[in-house]
Amino acid sequence: MVKLTDVAKKAGCSVTTVSRVINNYGYLSEATKNKVHKAMAELNYQPNSVARSLQGKKTQLVGVIFPSITNPFFGELVEKIENELFKEGYKTILCNAANDKEKERTYLQMLMANQVDGIIAGAHNLGIDEYKKTGLPIVSFDRKLSDNIPIVSSDNFAGGSLATETLYKNGARHIYFIGNPVLDGHPTQKRLQGYQQKIQELGLTPHVHPTKFGESLELKEMAIKELLQFHHVDGIVASDDLTALTVWQVANQLNIKLPQDLKIIGFDGSQYIQNYAPFLSTIVQPTSAISELLVKLLQERIAHPNDKLKQITYQLPIKLLNRKSCQ
C-alpha cells in the first residue's frame, strides 16, 4: 500500500506537511498544497483516517463491487458472497457499479480510502487502471482486471456450446445468439465464442442479434420483435435469463408457437428464475461454488499478499436445466 511517507518523498516535503495538507490544518502555501496533491494523484494515494487510527490492524471489511442486484443472478451471487464473508468474520460494503465506469472508479477510491481488507469485483466495466495500482488484495468474478488479479468464472464457453448443441438436438436449424458481441472481456463474449464454434461444427450459419448490457427493456423488446418478425429463427441462445424471458414474452405477443416453432435457452439459472419461470431452459452457473471460491481466494490474498499466484483463472463447470422452452 502507498503510505504517507511515499507521498512525502514524492512531493519533496515532510510527512507532517503532507498530513497538514490532507487535514487542511494550519497555513500552507498554494505551491506546497499543489505539490502534495500532485504526488497523491500520481501515487493513487487515498487519505485514510480509519486505517491510521487502527495502527495496522485489519478492518474486517471487504468491498463487493457488482452490477445492479435487481438482476436475479447478481442478487443471488452477492447474497451468497456476503454470507460466506460473514461466516469468516468480515462485514461487507456493497457497491452497485451498474454499467458506469466512473461510478465504479469512485467506489474503488472510496474502498481504498477506508482501507478495506480486500475487494471482490464483478461489475462489467472495463479499462479501470486503478485496479492495477490499489495494492489491495482483489479477486475478480468473470473479467480480467489486471495480470495479477485472480479470476473466478463459470465455463461460459462450454455453456454457449452446450446451449447451441441442445437446440440442434431438439430440431432447431436456424439458431441465433442474442447478446452483446463487442465488449472485450465481458463473459458474453465467451458464450458467443462457444456458440460460434458449435455452429461451425454442426455446419450451420451463425447469426448474432446484438443487445447491449444495461439496455432498456423497451429497446430490447424492439430489437427482439424485429428479429422474430423479419428473420427465419427457430432457436435462440440468449446471453442471460432476463433476455431469454423477454424473447419468450415477445414471441407470445406475436403468437409464435412455443416451443414448437421457436426454442429458447437462457444463461445463469438463478434460483429465482428456476422457481418463477419453470418453463425456461437455461445454463446454470454454480453460484454457491463461485461465492465460496471467491471468498477463499480473497482470504489467501489477504493472508499472503506477496505470494505469487499458482493460478490466475479458475473455471467452474456449468450444467443444463432442460425445460419446456427448448423441448
Image (spheres, grey):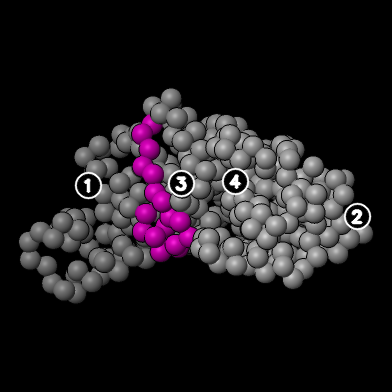
Find the distance from the CA under tag 1 to the CA under tag 2. Answer: 61 Å
**Which residue is the site of mark 3?**
69
Q: Which residues are magenta?
A: 90-107
Q: Is residue 104 left or right of residue 41?
A: right
Q: Is residue 264 visible?
A: yes
Which label sits on residue 151?
4
From the viewer's perspective, tell me whether residue 295 is left or right of residue 167.
left
Mark 1 and mark 2 lie on one chain; the one further toward the N terminus is 1
Q: Earlier in the sequence, mark 3 or mark 4?
A: 3
3D distance between C-alphas at marks 3 and 1: 30 Å
Q: Is residue 195 magenta?
A: no
Please, what secondary structure does the residue beneath circle 3 have? loop
Dot 3 or dot 1: first in sequence order is 1
As for residue 94 lying within the magenta part, the answer is: yes
| Structural distance between the alpha carbons of marks 2 and 3 | 37 Å
Disc 1 target residue: 49
Q: Which residue is mark 2?
A: 202
Mark 4 to mark 1 CA distance (whole Å): 31 Å
